Image: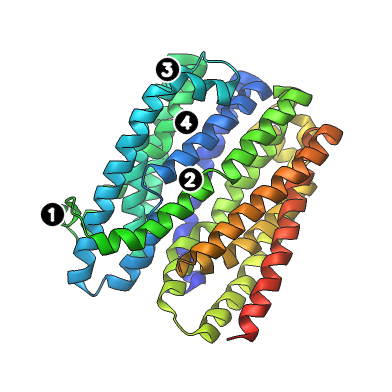
Amino acid sequence: MSLAKASIWTAGSTLIKIGAGLVVVKLLAVTFGPSGVGMAGNFRQLITVLGVLAGAGIFNGVTKYVAEYQQQPERLRPLLGTSVTLVLGFSTLLAILFLAAATPIANLLFGHDDYRDVVRARAFIQMGIAYANLCLAILKGYRDAIGNALAVIGGSLIGLAAFWLCLQLGGYVGALAGLALVPALLVIPAGIMLLRRTPLSLASLKPAWDRAIAGQLGKFTLMALMTAVTLPVAYIMMRNLLAAHYSWDDVGIWQGVSSISDAYLQFITASFTVYLLPTLSRLTDKAALAQEIVRSLKFVLPVVAGVSFCVWLLRDVAIWLLFSSEFTAMRDLFVWQLVGDVMKVGAYVFGYLVIAKAALRFYLLTEVSQFLLLTGFSHWLIPLYGAQGAAQAYMATYLVYFLLCCCVFIIYRRRA
């Protein structure tokens, strides 16, 4: 299946997922205003981080090795069993950690411990997210764009209904719990699709242990740990820095434009793990790998640039439709954010080559580079320009990072 065809199959599901996410943001914005959106930003960041760590960070590795071993049952079975064991172990450890440290975690995220019970609830909810992501990773390894799409559609609709119910019953505390439930409930349709659309059965997913496979997946665990302590921490630091110098309302303004970026970038990048990761994993010739990267960039960059330009033209409509009059200041942030989005997507194409080849040292270098760039630019620009400085720091980070990736790729290609 080509990148374009995979993109078509995933487009509908991604649009529904984006729509559900934007409805969630709209409900937050209308009900709680910029400060409510701003404080929820750190909690949503935590949800993203735990979604990776709860599964031991192995999901990209599972996709890679399922793509390689799907025709080799004797290697696929221990891979799946070991993956289930790692997910179970890591998610249990995280649950214990979050139950024990709920108060300091709440203080870090919100500046007070009023929402520590939400953090405790999150300790259990993350286990659902872990298994949902594992099911999706296996589907992606089989390059089943249709199954993946149906799971995402079902999960988005179920999650949106759960969020609305939590909001009605529990106010802001309920809304925070609902934010965590949205990705966790994806486990239901993802599990159904996995069992119905692949040759696997429940017996294939019984916990097992293979030391060699665990070692292979361990590289991806280290990658995930690095991811968890770099960019998410940098974004939390940015929000806290912006709140300290200005206010949580300013954080909400920047979080608003970031939410729009996250939404439409999902549409652009949805096909990366469905097509690009397994494709790059199967290729072994450096020349063929370089050719696939160039072909992907030629397809992705014009698309994301065009979509970004459309978003910029419709920015006032987006603010009116997705937020409220309290978020009007967002319009001045779009140009910086959208340029950064184009550079970010371009850089991520190179990043999937690193993941596909499990190049641990290069991956750690890329994560540290992004962290240092984002932290450095934000500490320079946020005190000067507030929310606009946050968007400028984002743009500067990914402009520099994309140029660095291009330079490294040119060297790699010349050595092919």
Label 3: which secondary element: helix
* Marks 2 and 3, the one that precedes in the sequence: 2
Q: Visible in this render: residue 412?
A: yes
> Alpha-carbon distance for marks 1 and 2?
31 Å
Q: What residue is shown with label 1? A: 203
* Badge 2: residue crowd in 10 Å (few <14, some 14–19, many ≥20): many
Q: What residue is shown with label 4? A: 179
Tag shown at residue 117: 3
The kind of residue tagged 3 is Asp
Label 2: which secondary element: helix
x and y percentages locating residue 292 in the rendered image: 54, 78
Q: Residue at x 35, y 53 (%)?
A: 136
> Alpha-carbon distance for marks 4 and 3?
14 Å
x and y percentages locating residue 205 in the rendered image: 19, 53
Q: Visible in this render: residue 314?
A: no
* Marks 4 and 3, the one that precedes in the sequence: 3
* Marks 4 and 2, the one that precedes in the sequence: 2
Label 1: which secondary element: helix
Q: Nearer the viewer, mark 1 or mark 4?
A: 1
Disc 4 to disc 3: CB gap under 8 Å = no
Nearer to the camera, 161 or 224: 224
* Badge 1: residue crowd in 10 Å (few <14, some 14–19, many ≥20): few
